[in-house]
Amino acid sequence: MIFYGSYLTYLPILLGHSFHASSFTIGIIMSIMSLTTAVSSSQLGRLSTIYSPKTLLRTAFIFYAVALVIIPFIHSLWLLPLPIIIFGMGHGMTYPNIQILLAALAPSENRGAFMSINGMVLRLGQTLGPVLMGIVLLGWGIQGVFYAGAVCSMAMFMFLVAIGK
């Protein structure tokens, strides 16, 4: 919901409406997150020798929240890459670590089912994220969409802290 709702659906709308960015510029700015995600995830091997997957996942949700809180305060298109880079760093730590944790939880004979359910949950977030954030948009405007994403990120962080090491 955080990625597909707040970021992927509503950031291009913000860029177009608030910054009057062209489609090309929106594409360039959106690609910054993808590049940062690639660099961030490429460093997980080194980071995982120091930190546990859960610690990295907690950190990722903090990065998501920080980036999403900053976005509504940006008033220059050229400053927007800063929160986008932070978001990409979080994103690069999220998916690989979720896969690691799921694989560790699943008994080997049920691993395929676990991964399939993960894919289903991902698609559910992909479907519901834009709709739920659309409801937030109607009630609280475009800034509310990013704040709601930050709240979801912090809720996930707190959940991960609550379930322990």
Image (tube, rainbow, N blue to C red):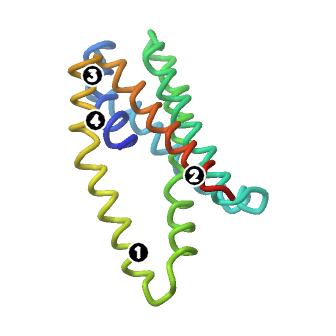
In the rendered image, which residue does mark 3 sit on? 22
Residue in front for this viewpoint, 19 or 92 = 92
The residue under the point 43% across, 17% down is 72
Residue matched to label 2:
93
Q: Which is more N-terminal, label 4 or label 1?
A: 4
Q: Residue at x 40, y 73 (%)?
A: 115
The amino acid type found where label 2 is placed reads Met
- Of all residues shown, which one is farthest toward the bottom? 109
| Numbered disc in front, either 3 or 4 | 4
Q: What's the amino acid at mark 1?
A: Phe
How crowded is the residue under tag 3: few (<14 C-alpha within 10 Å), some, or many (20+)?
A: few
Would you say the residues marked 1 and 2 are in contact, meaning their CB atoms lie under 8 Å apart? no
Which mark is nearer the camera, 1 or 4? 1
The N terminus lies in which quarter of the figure? Answer: top left
Q: Secondary structure under badge 1?
A: helix
92 vs 152, left or right, is right
Circles 1, 4 touching at the beta carbon (< 8 Å): no
Q: Nearer the viewer, residue 53 or 81?
A: 53
Query: What residue occupies the far top of the structure in this picture?
Result: 75
User: Tag 4: residue type?
Assistant: Thr
Q: In the rendered structure, which disc, 1 or 3, sits on the residue that comes first in sequence?
A: 3
Q: Nearer the viewer, residue 139 or 13?
A: 139
Instruction: Kindly indicate whether the residue at mark 2 contacts the one at mark 4 (C-beta within 8 angstroms).
Output: no
Percent from the top left, x then y, of residue 28? 39, 33
Q: Position of residue 112 (x, y in %)?
A: 39, 81
Residue of label 1: 114
Which of the 4 image quarters holds residue 48? bottom right
Question: How many neighbours does mark 2 have within 10 angstroms: few (below 14), some (14-19), or many (20 or more)?
Answer: many
Residue holding disc 4: 9
